[in-house]
Structure formats: structure tokens, C-alpha cells
Image (spheres, rainbow, N blue to C red):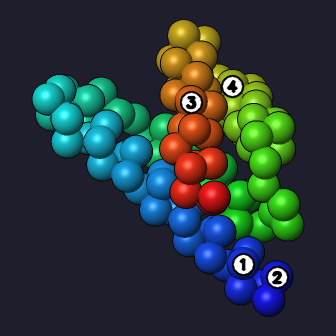
Amino acid sequence: MEKSKKVLGAGIVVAAIAAAATYFLTGKRGRENREKIAAWTLDMKAEVLHKMKQLKMLNREVYLALVDEVAARYQRVGRVSASEMRHLTEEMKGAWTHISRQLK
């Protein structure tokens, strides 16, 4: 039973992240946003998603720590400016409200 809840939760998280990505890419400024997106942002989001699937328990604190951990690793690589990383990290942390709604 817990395994099915975990799988269901992971599916809901995937749907929440996909919804956020869709909104970001298809909004009024979607074309402009698509042109600005670099491959590393998608890689970072995918890595967070992958690590979320591996978690046994997902709550706000765990999610925020996960985002910080992945962001720190990408910052060390040096392919991204501090302001870009700060913006993406805040965006991903802000997605928790949408994710938590889907988990309930």
C-alpha cells in the first residue's frame, strides 16, 4: 500500500512540475522565455525531479534542502551566474506550493 502511495505521489509531483513548466513556456512571454532557457536549467530541474522520485518521504523541508543541494552543485560547475542561479532556485522553491497541493 505504501509503495502505491509513493508511486502515486511521484506521479503527482511529475504532473505538478510539468504544469509549472508548461505555464512558464506557454505564457504571454513564453516565446521570450523559451529563447532564454539554457540547457542547464532543464538539467537541474530534471535532476531535482529524479532525486524526488528516490525519496521515501517528501515534505517542504526535504524539498527545499534538495533544491539547495542541487543548486550548490550547479553553482560550483560555474556555467551559470549567481543571479540566474538565485532566480531559478527561488522559482523551484516557489513550486512547493503547487507540489504540496497535488500531494494532498
Q: Do tag 2 and tag 4 residues touch (Cβ < 8 Å)?
A: no
Camera-side residue: 6 or 31? 6
- Circles 2 and 1 in contact, beta carbons < 8 Å: yes
The front one of 63 and 78 is 63
Q: Nearer the viewer, mark 3 or mark 2?
A: 2
How far is the residue under mark 1 from the one under mark 4? 34 Å
Count of numbered labels shown in the rendering: 4
Q: Earlier in the sequence, mark 2 or mark 4?
A: 2
Q: Secondary structure at mark 4?
A: helix
Q: Which residue is mark 4?
A: 75
Q: CA distance from mark 3 to mark 2?
A: 27 Å
In the image, 75 versus 87, the foreground residue is: 87
* Coordinates of residue 45 in the picture (x, y in percent): 55, 46
What residue do we see at 46% from left, 62% from top? 15
Instruction: Identify which residue is drawn at 55% across, 57% down.
Output: 102
Kindly report the distance in space between the C-alpha atoms of the residues bearing marks 2 and 1.
5 Å
Q: Residue at x 71, y 58 (%)?
A: 52
Q: Secondary structure at mark 2?
A: helix
Q: Could you give the CA–CA distance between mark 2 and mark 4, rounded to whole angstroms?
A: 36 Å
SS state under label 1: helix
Q: Residue at x 61, y 40 (%)?
A: 96
Which callout, 2 or 4, points to the residue nearer the camera? 2
Query: According to the image, label 2 marks what residue?
Result: 2
Q: Estimate the x, y position of residue 67 in percent, counting from the top left.
A: 71, 37
Q: Quadrant of the N terminus?
A: bottom right
Res 95 quadrant in image? top right
Q: Which numbered marker is on residue 5?
A: 1
| Residue 33 image point, x, y percent | 26, 30
Which image quadrant: the C terminus? bottom right
Residue type at mark 4? Gln
